[in-house]
Amino acid sequence: MTGRRYSPRTAAPRRPGRGRRPGHRRRRAQGVDAACVLATAALAAVLFPQARQELARHGSSIATIAVAALAVGALILLLVKAVRRGASAWAARRRRPEGWDVRLLLDSLHHTEFEEAVRDLMRRDGARDAVRVGGAGDNGADVKGTDPAGRRWVIQCKHRRDGAAGAAVGTPDLHVLNGTGRPVHGGDVVVLVTNGRFTGPAKEFARSQRLHLVDRHLLNEWSTGSTPLWDLLSHLPAPRRHPPAIRRGRQALPNESR
């Protein structure tokens, strides 16, 4: 979702005795850093003579071990930085679920991140209660939420690492979803979303069971545009409640909201 913008606020008067001097936390942090530096220097002063003696006795073996330790430490540091960089990039993109290209972003996600992306797209479109429930024992549902019309959505996600070139989603996956989407999860709209494709029999089965399919092309239209999924799909059940009387691009007239 989009990042929050916090407006500046006037500082409230502090209670007597509980105030902090300006820069207190900064000076405290600097003091902790200085103490750490002094402790490190003292430890080095104690250990350096002993290390020098051991180095004189076993110079070659100690040097080899030190070089190996430095190499391993540098490799671990690089791996940690790469993981943090990747997590930060995904977190930043997840806060902006508009313009999510299937090929450039969604194909590269882990399957759990793909489920989170679908959840965030539902939230973007107005399903504020959308949650990811995928995992062991999910009974065929990965994302659930309620649209502005009050309809309960139950979504199963199938991520394909190779996108359209990956294995097509077939009827076995739809059998599970069809058996639990309405009876177990109470869904009004039951959907299977994939960044790949569906087999012909799967499409026929979905049509006969009132299941909705979102393939790679429809997913790209949904994720890169601003149209909610419920406006992209057809043959949806009747709304449980009327959405706010606002038309796209203009406010509803008084006689339209009655």
Image (cartoon, grey):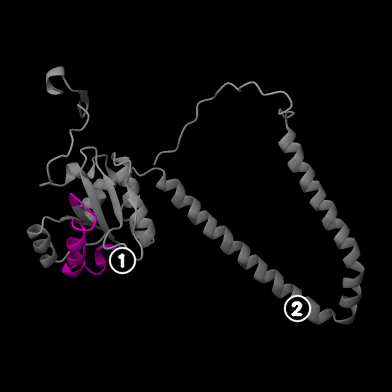
The image's mark for residue 162 is 1
**From this viewpoint, which residue is outermost toward the top?**
254
Observer-nearest of 153 and 46: 153
Dot 1 amino acid type? Asp
Residue at image location 79% in from the left, 43% down from the top: 31
On the image, the x and y values in percent for residue 26 come to: 72, 37
Instruction: Please give left or right for residue 171 compared with residue 118 in the image.
Output: left
213 vs 99: above or below: below
133, 110: nearer the viewer: 133
Amino acid identity at mark 2: Thr
Q: What mark, if any, has residue 80 been given in the picture?
A: none
Residue 166 drawn in magenta: yes
Above or below residue 105? Residue 55 is: below
The residue nearer to you, when weighing 69 against 178, is 178
Assess disc 1: are there few (<14), some (14-19) or many (≥20) residues with their C-alpha within 10 Å of its C-alpha.
Answer: few
Residue to which mark 2 is pinned: 64
**Residue 66: image location, x then y, percent:** 75, 73
Mark 1–mark 2 Cα distance, whole angstroms, equals 44 Å
Q: Is residue 162 left or right of residue 35?
A: left
Specify the quadrant that holds the C terminus: top left
Magenta span = 161-189
Secondary-structure class at tag 1: loop
